[in-house]
Amino acid sequence: MGRNTVVRRIAAWVLAVLCAVAILPVYDWGGSANASEDEWEKTVDFLGTTGIKAPTAPDYWDDEWEGSYIWFGHYNKRPIKFRVLAPQTNKFGGNTVFLDCASSLYTSNFRSNVRPYTEGVLVNHWKDSDIRESLNSTGFLYHDFGFTDQERDVIAKSAVASHMLATNATWGEQDERAIVAELAENYVPLTGEKVFLLDAEDVTNPVYGYYGGDISHLNNDQVASRDKSNGSSSYWWLRSQCTEVDWCAMVVANGNRVKSFMVDYEFGVSPAMNLDLNKVLFSSAVKGNAGAAGTEYKLTIIDDTKSIEVTSGKKITTDNYNTVTVPYTLGGNSYAYSRISLLVLDKEYTPGNTNNAGIVSYEKLNTTGSNPAQEGNVTFELPSMIKLHPEYWGTQYYLYLVAENVNNSYVTDYASAPLPIEDPNASKVLSFDLNGGLSGAPAAITATAGASVTIPKSSPVRNGYYFLGWSTSKTASAATYKSGDKITLNASVKLYAVWKAATYKLTFDGNGATGGTAPSTITVNGGGTATVPKCSLTRTGYYFMGWATSNTATTAAYKSGSKITLSGNLTLFAVWKNATPVTYTLSFDRNGGSGNAPAKITTAAGSTVTIPKCSVDREGHYFMGWSTTRGGAVAYKSGDTLTLTKDTVLYAVWKAKTVTLSFDRNGGSGNAPSKVTTTYGSVVTIEKCSISREGYWFLGWSTARGGEVKYKSGNAITLKDNTVLYAVWKKK
């Protein structure tokens, strides 16, 4: 190889590396607000995720995934790109946006130990998997330089019930959803996880942009919509277990087909999650056109540590509906903010945008210095329609101030809850929000601007909580106002009920224990969850089974590790099982027979016994076996096994032998009675007959040729063996 060739190859390699680095998103973990303002001039496109386009259902296996993307959080200091499977859904127990990582971020096994041999643990079940624990702890959610506290707060706890997997009958056996439903059978439930893996049903669901139809002509082609080969592994785990074997779980594997593999294999991890839309304020397009497929967004989320309020004792003013000046105060450190913005909506703001409000305008307001002062004034010009029609302010146009920390284009922004800016000349309303309570809120009060209003008496109610008073903050732990206090209405104010959780006790009763110590009493806040601890209780002659709410219970409702949500004080009683072995007896009834029946068998409850051979007999009968009821059918024969769960009697089953009665004319002629075939012991009536013999009188029937008459027509005979009756003749 020549020197020039080597040089050219090195140069090409260096250029490739530089190009690869150039196309990666550039960001600064934890960068200052000032730097981020310089890097990206923020625009907002949607309130919440209202206008983000849902995925397109693929028609063919080679259709790539087509939908929208959201950048959210970090992994190993790099922003994470998620596919938006549903811009808005209620499937997971709340109003959320459903996200699936656009690549596999790292590799892991589903469970490291294939054979744990632990009672109640199945190695391929999501709830017992190592990967579930890792995703929701330091493996991902709490990974170093990963999500901020505020981002973790926005990630919703997901809950969805199990159901039979959906199939598509269009393609019959060649439909991939039908194949997956046979392998995985049931949708795997979620029980409050913040981070999870997709289910086999999800990755074959066209609603989420994933192909699940006809694969009869697939051959070596790829199911393009499930391709994540740009990540750490082209194979990536699902949370579904394989129903055929208990050591395999489902994987998007070769050809991006859904298959099963052993749980200790190392495959890609593609986290999925739901974000609480009540905490998502804005969506901003950072690449592509807002509302179109393929567009990438960043979010502005509500940060509960940030707030903006009208400065106490000061008023909002307007110069004849041309400009508005708002005296403001920021909560916390002013360096936590990079801007104050004006938001104009066509409807009132509601968390989660439940009324589908649209953004009329959004603009950064001028403030003194690089960061807004802790306290100051902002002035802005009113929208032209309000200038012309002041009555539109608060009826058709709604104004809000938002205090923000704006970061670069791939990093989440943080904001206060929007502060309503009302017409200072209009009447003001004092309203009350029970904030989780059930009843007892005072009626709203309307007053002129600047009026002093008294907080009325009230008795709000919330199960498991004490009412402390009222606050302007939904998350306050101490009351700012109580009944009888006065508040000046320079603007409309909403007061939120402030609650303190009641405390409840979980106590443990040994219920006859003779040794050990019952667990200590556990105290939790009302509605809180207590975990049943391990204990050392013993009772002579008994096994400890667990705990129940009744002292007479025979089965345990709770065991060590069980979770209990307390809505009041609760006592759990130890449940005991008698340790003395229970025995049952198997005995045999000859049921009319004689001879030697098997001897009684006495053994521990639940034991399996073998039916022994025997020499029972009964005249005229065959021995067939044993029944569990007298006169019943054969259930067991010698050599069969029986599990004893109670005292049991088996009855001999007999079948009567077959016997015949026939007639010998003994030298006569004519029609003798027909032969009779019947069972042993049957009684037969002798029929009339028309036999004759020349020179003789017919006298009757004998049991021996030449014997005396024993029977005549109409007589009854009991048959216990095959019998021949001979005609008896007397010479004339």
Image (tube, rainbow, N blue to C red):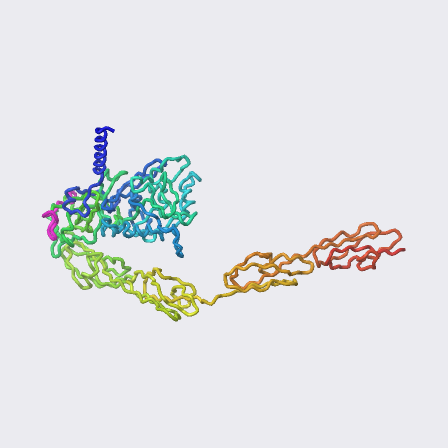
Is 725 part of what is drawn in magenta?
no
User: 145 or 484: which is nearer to us?
Assistant: 145
- For the image, the number of numbered tags is 0
Residue 476 visible at all: yes
User: 666 or 43: which is nearer to us?
Assistant: 666
Residue 245 coordinates in the image, percent (x, y): 42, 48
Determine whether, in the image, residue 334 is placed left or right of residue 287.
Answer: left
Q: Quadrant of the N terminus?
A: top left
User: 317 or 480: which is nearer to us?
Assistant: 480
Determine whether, in the image, residue 237 is placed left or right of residue 460.
Answer: right
Magenta range is 367-386
Residue 619 coordinates in the image, percent (x, y): 69, 60
Residue at point 32%, 37% (across, down): 64
Is 377 part of what is drawn in magenta?
yes
Determine whether, in the image, residue 634 is placed left or right of residue 520.
Answer: right
Residue 320 visible at all: no
Q: Quadrant of residue 285?
A: top left
Q: Quadrant of the C terminus?
A: bottom right
Residue 109 coordinates in the image, percent (x, y): 34, 48
Residue 177 coordinates in the image, percent (x, y): 40, 42
Reply above or below: 603 against 86.
below
Residue at point 42%, 36% (across, down): 216
